[in-house]
Image (tube, grey):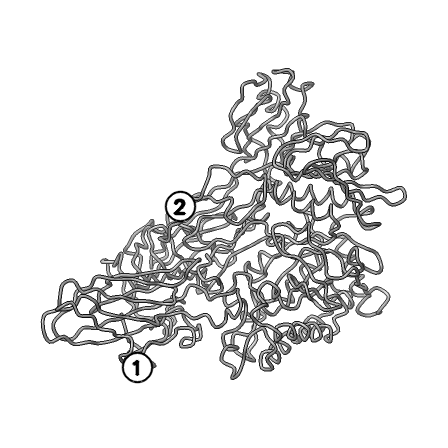
Amino acid sequence: MREATKILVFHLVWFLCIHVPPMFCANVTYDHRALLIDGKRRVFISGSIHYPRSTPQMWPDLIQKSKDGGLDVIETYVFWNFHEPVRGQYYFEGRGDLVNFVKLVAAAGLYVHLRIGPYACAEWNYGGFPLWLHFIPGIKFRTDNEPFKAEMQRFTAKIVDMMKQENLYASQGGPIILSQIENEYGNIDKPYGAAGKSYIKWAASMATSLNTGVPWVMCQQPDAPDPMINTCNGFYCDQFTPNANAKPKMWTENWSGWFLSFGGAVPYRPVEDIAFAVARFYQRGGTFQNYYMYHGGTNFGRTSGGPFISTSYDYDAPIDEYGIIRQPKWGHLRDLHKAIKLCEEALIATDPTITSLGSNLEAAVYKSGTVCAAFLANIGTSDSTTNFNGNSYQLPAWSVSILPDCKNVVLNTAKINSASTTSSFITQSLKLKEDGGGALEDSSSEWSWISEPIGISKNDSFSKFGLVEQINTTADKSDYLWYSLSIDFEDDVSAQTVLHIESLGHALHAFINGKLAGSGKGNSGNAKVNVDIPITLVAGKNTIDLLSLTVGLQNYGSFFDTWGAGITGPVTLKGLKNGTTIDLSSQQWTYQIGLQGEDLGLSSGSVGQWNSQSNLPKNQPLTWYKTNFVAPSGNDPVAIDFTGMGKGEAWVNGQSIGRFWPTYVSPNSGCATSCNYRGSYSSSKCLKNCGKPSQTLYHVPRSWLQTDSNTLVLFEESGGDPTQISFATKQIGSLCSHVSESHPPPIDMWNSDSESGRRSGPVLSLECPNPKQIISSIKFASFGTPSGSCGSFNHGSCSSNKALSIVKKACIGSSSCKINVSIDTFGDPCRRVTKSLAVEASCT
């Protein structure tokens, strides 16, 4: 059936369900094996896409790529503070248009798992809770507390009602087949005691009372009361067991990578390990698995949590931050999904029979009547050969072979048939726009600026004895809080004076008499700041201005809403004359919430007295910069490279692209040139980018750019040079594949003709990422014992001298090509050795 016809049929069924209930409405239930749609068990593969972390213009493409990758379900959190920033004032437009997002998923023919929470975690600011919630009298979050429960129920009911009004639940003919209440509470509930237990019971009862007509889940909640389905989150969930025999085994978060923190190296997760984990889950009885994330996206504005979560939320997901398919991760998982779906009839028919085949070797068989599917697993770190049903099978270390007919291997998780790609950012200088309208290459004369006042400059400042906690003071209306104090010295002051500051975090800048004296910052492991800054004081009046700043609020942990920030002291002057120390903590300080430039709306670029003289201040703290620029041509995704800047926030045409911090460098140690997928994965196992800035490139959605004139506004905290900023477009470079003689045939050959597919050998396939492209050159081709990875292949000790010419003939000038990986094609350059074919191509 053609895609357009499929969508038409979907909409017709949806229409009939709404207007002729209940004939066409889906009845979603569950039993011990699976979710059931209209009484039929289903095997589901799901992926997370958080709608506010991309733009509405990106959503259709992201959803289609998810469907093409073999997903059945899109999973998303609902972000309370994004939708209700002020109590009773709602925002469901633009990136917050949840209804539109759900409808687009439905139009693609996919289901939705709506994780209402309304606590999200998700490395999102304050875990998704709005800050105004914190100030409700008598409130305590996530426990048996009446004020909290009232607010939680009100927002949850609002979201449910919104979905019902649009007929979006499956019971109404819509795509939503699951909802979630709370989130990972079981990880942190012990300190809440009995009140936590009663809270969970209340949450379950409240959710089911909303009558959505679909099941509810609670993830990481072993004591989830009926009818809640308790589910698993983690890197591996094959050993998970639901808390009742009547509930299916579900995995709501399979972490496809890990999040990036400012000051940290970039984590990634090899696809061989993810595929192993997924196959193990279905091998041992699972029927619903979700990738967290399938597309991570971007923490625009001040939405990132942590603290110290980076603006990029790429997560090493199958679809990258910019919406580009990440290969071979996307392709190998797509093949895995096809293999699992070939087993669906057997998987839903019965429970697995699991037997040991030897040390670290395990077989699971699903057999019912004439259908039979098997999974053979090697959970050790050494390759092995095993016998099963009278046949011999090679099982690479840390892999699962899938046999849809209990005889023939359709896929092994460690053997990748999918092509891989390299991508790179192509840098171009910032094309600035002259007032007259013409384009001008990089020039400081086309930047204008405004200096942010140091210290107190606003009329709403206030004074108080002692030091205040920041979040309770600012209510997170700004990252910034000024602490200002004047102190007099009658005599000369010692040149050895040291300003000692202790802060709950997350960073600070200290100014003495209007000059930056020093700074300090925490990190993702410890947000607190403890600094000793050498300063120079003068006889007479001295002004101490301390700028404290947050970098996303805490989003996880017991009572995380009570964790503070800001300079709570002590603050002391040490090494004064005669070696004395003065404690300034209890003195009268003057406070200012936020920046003058924030109140003026400088981020829009359309207000303020911008200075455009030629002497552009560079490497000066607390400076607003503005320029007009021409958008990069073409359709490739766009980023700004902030190399040369310090720390701050950036806006394009009034839209915040997030916090930038290219000067926060990751540790020198912990990274390796490659990561062995064999053995258990952890978030620190596979790291790259050590000794380099955590993030220099920041996503600018194409839909935020105008063809001709655009405005870029920066606020720089610590000092930088805006003329060093450049644009970059992300482009696909090489297209590669590396397939051995021991690989199974491509999975599509099994689908199209199972008998011929089983007799065929391995095939190397290449396909240009853009359907309008053709393969224009072959950069490398070797059949024998090649090594390396895409972009850095090497010939091994043996190599067929025919390989390059054969590959060129088969591929150049075509958008795709297939080559049999066998000695029949290339000859035998080295006998009694398992050979492979490695190819690197380029498309234009």
Spatial CA distance of label 1 from label 2 is: 52 Å
Query: Which residue is under mark 2?
Result: 428
Q: Which mark is residue 712?
A: none
Q: Position of residue 453 (x, y in %)?
A: 27, 70
Provide the secondary structure element on which disc 1 rests.
strand
- Is residue 501 shown above or below 250? below
Q: Residues within 10 Å of mark 1 (few under 14, many from 20)?
A: few
Which numbered marker is on residue 465?
A: 1
Q: Nearer the viewer, residue 734 or 268?
A: 268
Frontmost residue, 475 versus 491: 491
Q: Element under label 2? A: strand
Judge whether residue 294 can be spotted in this image: no
Which quadrant is home to the C terminus? Answer: top right
Q: Quadrant of residue 382?
A: top right
- Residue under the image location 44 percent in, 48 percent down: 265
Q: Examine the rendering and report whether any part of residue 134 can be seen.
A: yes
Q: x%, y% of residue 230?
A: 70, 62
Q: Amino acid at mark 1?
A: Phe
Q: Is residue 208 left or right of residue 609?
A: right
Are the residues tagged 1 and 2 within 8 Å (C-beta)? Answer: no
Give the image location of residue 35, x and y in percent.
Answer: 77, 58
- First-in-chain label (1 vs 2): 2
Q: Residue at x 62, y 23 (%)?
A: 835
What's the residue type where badge 2 is placed?
Gln
